[in-house]
Amino acid sequence: EDKVVQSPLSLVVHEGDTVTLNCSYEVTNFRSLLWYKQEKKAPTFLFMLTSSGIEKKSGRLSSILDKKELFSILNITATQTGDSAIYLCAFDTSGTYKYIFGTGTRLKVLA
Amino acid sequence: GAVVSQHPSWVICKSGTSVKIECRSLDFQATTMFWYRQFPKQSLMLMATSNEGSKATYEQGVEKDKFLINHASLTLSTLTVTSAHPEDSSFYICSASLAGAGETQYFGPGTRLLVL
């Protein structure tokens, strides 16, 4: 059975800290890994990763995928209170094109 | 580009009534739309995959007679929660793929349903 595990479940940091969020997976037909940020409404797209070892970067956020060890990390540097959200990773499984979501990491950044 | 809307944003209804939620792709055609539900402090759970012009494919454990999905056009899919009960109260989110199955999904803003 396909499985996605995110850690930690919850995290509280102060502004300016750097955080690393983990997503590990067991997926039979891996196509791509996606990271989403969810605040009060629906998730907003952050990154799509398909190849191992290639870092994707957007401002203070970056992400990388390790297909050998079956995990991905999402880094946020110099955190701000606006980064407070739930961060979800998901898998796009080839053949079905359905997304399987992890449980999410709830990040709270204190001023 | 790639904007998905949902209507309504919030709905409160009495137990036993049916509720229809619309999902529209505003600036692109979506061959495939997906419906998710999310309970508080939980992740998104896929309910069904909706393809234009054909019957929806439901995930295991999702009652197709309870959650009716219609994908009548390339820009509109509807989810009807029939005879809603308090346990159906949840956050319902749709997503749409730009060029059909296999492309990045773009999410609507979600609909919060509260059944009294």
Image: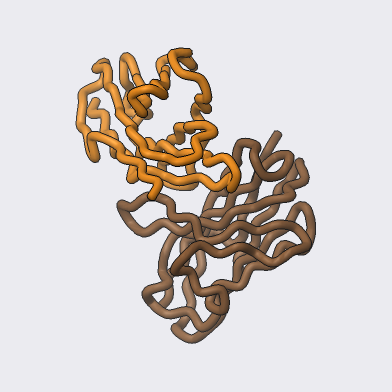
User: The C terminus of chain B lies in which quarter of the figure?
Assistant: bottom left
Chain coloured brown: which letter? B
Q: Which of the 4 image quarters holds residue A77?
A: top left
Number of dots carrying numbers: 0
Of residue A48 and residue A29, the one placed in the foreground of this image is A29
Residue A38: % across, % down: 42, 40
Colour treatment of the image: by chain
Left or right position of B71 against A48: right
Image position of B105 (left or right of B70)? left
Query: Residue A99 or B9: which is nearer the viewer?
Result: A99
At horizontal 42% and vertical 72% (from top left) the residue drawn is B88
Q: Answer with the quarter of the image where residue A52 lies.
A: top left
The chain drawn in orange is A
> B9 above or below B20?
above
Residue at x-position 59% and y-position 53%: B34
**Quarter that holds the N terminus of chain B:** top right
Q: Is residue A79 left or right of residue B104?
A: left
The residue shown at (61%, 67%) is B79
B24 or A103: which is nearer to us?
A103
